[in-house]
Image (tube, rainbow, N blue to C red):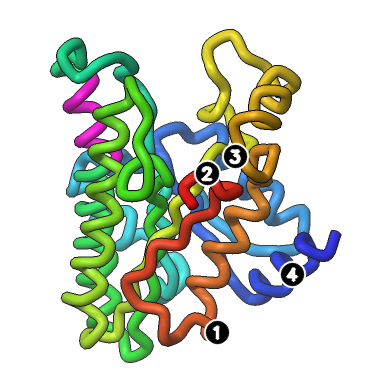
Amino acid sequence: MLQQERTARALTGVEPVAAGRTAAPLDETVALIEQGGGTAAAFTADVSRSGEVRALVDRTVTRFGSLDVAVNNAGVLRGGGPVADLSEEDWRSLVDINLTGVLFSLQAEIALMREQATGGVIVNLASNLGAHRRVPGLAGYVATKAGVSALTRAAALDHIADGVRINAVSPGPSATPMSLRPGEGDTARATRMEKDSPLGRVSATAEIAAAVLYLASPEAASVVGADLVVDGGAAA
């Protein structure tokens, strides 16, 4: 309850835009925000297409007048198996969405934010799998998420003088479908995580959101180019 209250306070006065390739979950997100008394919008966009990302930023500014905080959270996990067996299709999909999608998003967001008198803040979602730790069979995912970590730091140095502050959050397994193994349910995952995680559980989505909110907040004004790992100690 305390975390929910903190999140609610952090979002006071914020007008979020939910974006992704599929309209239904975006509309659901907007409905939940509006049920809580907030204002939000949903726009469909494919981050692997630069024109759609630029249009997303333009629509956001047209609707709300500015883009103050951007969270780049699109990602896929596919192509499990050794490097020698990784298909070209899976590799290209991982690179296009996980890495190039972040690049296109950064470019569109920074182009707008550096022209604003107030600048802006960007938080990219990387992963604890990448720059921080590796596991067998996920080379494509690991490579792209390590790229997000490196790209975040490079962009942060390039654009802090423009008034754009950029950081990353690197989650470990969290309470989302992506952390479920094939055929695994929540109960089986919880049992597995008791052994696999030093913390003994997956992270709650609210805990990942809290890290993003901190990096986006004025309290983190001097945090530039950080990559905040939230994984229950797995990469420690």
Question: Which amino acid, by three-letter code, is at mark 2?
Answer: Ala
Mark 1 packing: few (<14 Cα in 10 Å), some, or many (20+)?
few
Mark 2 packing: few (<14 Cα in 10 Å), some, or many (20+)?
some
Q: Nearer the viewer, mark 3 or mark 4?
A: 3
Residue 234 image label? 2
Instruction: Name which residue lies at 22% across and 87% down.
Output: 161
Magenta span dominant secondary structure:
helix
* Residue 39 appearing in the image: yes
Instruction: Name which residue lies at 49% across and 52% down.
Output: 236
The answer to which quarter of the image holds residue 188 is top right
First reached walking from the N terminus: tag 1 or tag 2? 1
**Residue hosting label 1:** 219
Q: Which secondary structure lies at badge 2? A: loop
Question: Which amino acid, by three-letter code, is at mark 3?
Answer: Ser
Instruction: Name which residue lies at 58% across and 41% down.
Output: 27
Mark 3 packing: few (<14 Cα in 10 Å), some, or many (20+)?
many
**Residue hosting label 4:** 6
What is the spatial separation of the Cα atoms under label 3 and label 2, in whole angstroms?
A: 12 Å
Q: Which secondary structure lies at badge 4? A: helix
Question: Which amino acid, by three-letter code, is at mark 1?
Answer: Glu
Q: Magenta stretch? A: 90-98
